[in-house]
């Protein structure tokens, strides 16, 4: 009986201690990192916008893009403007930061153009080290195939 | 100072009272109380970084409770908390109630509040967290108890308790290297699930010191003085549940991490030991009359919800892996604020 009690106490102590220190070991080897396929089906595979304008057709429920600007430095102050025009169906537009947190969105009805204008202050960009990387999600609200033109600009 | 001021006053007031009144059995009296306090849902409840990003509306709460006379065949409690926001809006924050069947109490309490996970400024110390899904959320709390009153201690109950809470939680995120790769999303330090769920099952005990004082019963850490019809002193009213804790994400974390970062996530819903404590550290004044009892308590009230988990961590062994872990230290709840409570039995 006494031995069982000791075992129970040991088990509880182990539970406490393991709960206090559970930080996993991480390898520093970055070889074999996953490579995006650029299909636009997720944030990871977001299509890189190499120019300020992209015209395409969306048949699925959503598509992802990413873009950046060498204009954005640590003390950047200005706006990033996104536009979604030439719509043949209802779509919504969302803008995400480099942490994939949604920072702004536009959700007009029908084929009305969507626009996002997001302002940055110097303070907000104090520690930027990702060269102004942003992500975009276009949601196909109508469900049918739709054409669109996506634009971005920094000013 | 307070005690020095109050005590002589009470003694003076009670000098004309008879020391040995014939009182009705308090079990024939209905108990009603009103409490004014801060809302149970506040970002200040977090002890970690969530305090910087989680937002609830600033609000005060008005709590009204009614307990039926205990000598009747059917005993019940019922109560509600109304939240009054700073902008003037009011809404139902919580409802609670209990019934006694065959000497066994079945008690239930639900509470809810809408909140928002705010935007984190880049460069802020909370930068590097990824909010999964919508930033707006509904925090929910459910408590179910089955138990009995203690004989000769009507203000106390004990038994089995179950708590289910849904609220924002921060899941630490570990990857190989640091910060992600050029032209890809930054690897976050933590994922924030706005509606993470905790389930706690274990032993339950509650005691209401104000009611105990109004009955001349023992309380918990209750140190009373009396003079005539008056009683006063300090006490610790509490509702505590302690037992097994299981927590789980409301999101498909593996899919989120795969879609966002192309990584394979190693994550297991954690299990361990947990405890919940709703408390009032209070100064109590009670006045016993032959046909009724009056009580007043004021002090600090709040709640704590904490736990420790078994070590189920795995290691990041390659660059295409990530490990997610709920960090107890960042997700513990410890909330407190002033309150004042009035009660009467008649």
Image (cartoon, grey):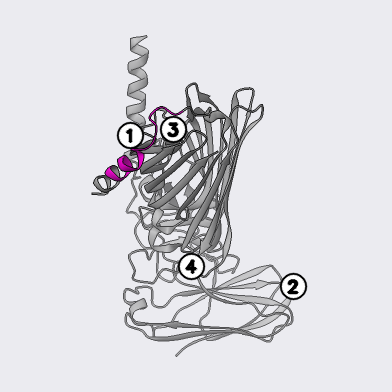
The residue pinned by badge 4 equals B86
The residue pinned by badge 1 equals B227
- Marks 3/4 same chain: yes
Q: Which residues are magenta?
A: B8-21
Q: Chain of mark 2?
A: A
The residue pinned by badge 2 equals A142
Mark 1 in CB contact with mark 3 (< 8 angstroms): no
> Residue lying furthest right in this view?
A144
**Viewer-side residue, A27 vs B47:** B47
Per the model, the C-alpha gap separating discs 3 and 4 is 34 Å
User: Image height check: is B298 above or below B30?
Assistant: below
Q: Secondary structure at mark 4?
A: loop
Task: Name the residue at 44% across, 29% down.
Answer: B21
Number of other residues with Cα within 10 Å of mark 1, as a class: few under 14, some 14 to 19, many 20 or more: some
Tag in front: 4 or 1: 1
Please indicate, yes or no, whether residue B316 appears anywhere in the rendered image. Answer: no
């Amino acid at each position: 009986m006494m031995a069982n009690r000791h075992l129970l106490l040991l088990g509880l102590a182990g539970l406490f201690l393991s709960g206090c220190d559970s930080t996993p070991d991480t390898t520093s080897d970055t070889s074999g990192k996953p490579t995006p396929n650029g299909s636009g089906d997720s944030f990871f595979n977001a299509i890189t916008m190499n120019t300020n304008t992209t015209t395409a057709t969306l048949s699925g429920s959503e598509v992802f893009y990413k873009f950046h600007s060498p204009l954005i430095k640590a003390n950047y102050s200005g706006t990033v403007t996104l536009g979604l025009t030439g719509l043949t169906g209802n779509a919504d537009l969302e803008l995400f930061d480099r942490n994939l947190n949604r920072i702004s969105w536009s959700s007009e009805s029908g084929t009305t153009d969507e626009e996002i204008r997001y302002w940055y202050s110097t303070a907000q960009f104090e520690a930027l080290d990702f060269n102004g990387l942003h992500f975009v999600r276009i949601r196909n609200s109508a469900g049918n195939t739709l054409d669109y033109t996506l634009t971005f600009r920094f000013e | 100072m307070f005690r020095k001021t109050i005590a002589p006053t009470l003694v003076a007031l009670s000098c004309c009272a008879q020391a040995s009144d014939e009182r009705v059995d308090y079990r024939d009296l209905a108990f009603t109380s009103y409490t004014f306090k801060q809302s149970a849902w506040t970002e200040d409840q977090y002890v970690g970084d969530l305090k910087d990003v989680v937002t609830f509306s600033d609000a005060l709460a008005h709590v009204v409770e009614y307990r039926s006379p205990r000598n009747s065949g059917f005993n019940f409690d019922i109560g509600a908390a109304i939240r009054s926001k700073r902008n003037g809006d009011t809404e139902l924050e919580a409802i609670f109630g209990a019934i006694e069947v065959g000497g066994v109490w079945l008690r239930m309490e639900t509470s809810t509040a809408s909140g928002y996970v705010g935007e984190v400024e880049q460069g802020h110390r909370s930068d590097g967290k990824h909010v999964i899904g919508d930033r707006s959320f509904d925090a929910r709390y459910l408590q179910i108890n089955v138990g009995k009153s203690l004989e000769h201690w009507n203000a106390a109950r004990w038994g089995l308790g179950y708590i289910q809470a849904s609220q924002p939680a921060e899941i630490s995120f570990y990857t190989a290297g640091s910060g992600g790769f050029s032209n890809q999303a930054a690897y976050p330090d933590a994922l924030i699930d706005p509606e993470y769920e905790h389930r706690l099952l274990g032993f339950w005990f509650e005691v209401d010191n104000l009611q105990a004082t109004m009955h001349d019963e023992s309380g918990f850490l209750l140190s009373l003085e009396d003079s005539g019809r008056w009683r006063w002193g300090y006490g610790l009213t509490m509702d505590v549940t302690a037992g097994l804790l299981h927590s789980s994400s409301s999101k498909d974390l593996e899919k989120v991490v795969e879609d966002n970062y192309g990584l394979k996530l190693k994550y297991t819903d954690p299990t361990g030991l947990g405890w919940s404590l709703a408390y009032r550290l209070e100064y109590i004044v009670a006045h016993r009359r032959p046909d009724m009892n009056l009580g007043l308590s004021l002090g600090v009230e709040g709640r704590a919800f904490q736990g420790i988990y078994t070590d189920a961590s795995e290691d990041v062994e390659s660059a295409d892996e990530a490990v997610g872990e709920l960090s107890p230290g960042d997700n513990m709840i410890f909330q407190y604020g002033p309150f004042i409570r009035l009660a009467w039995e008649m």
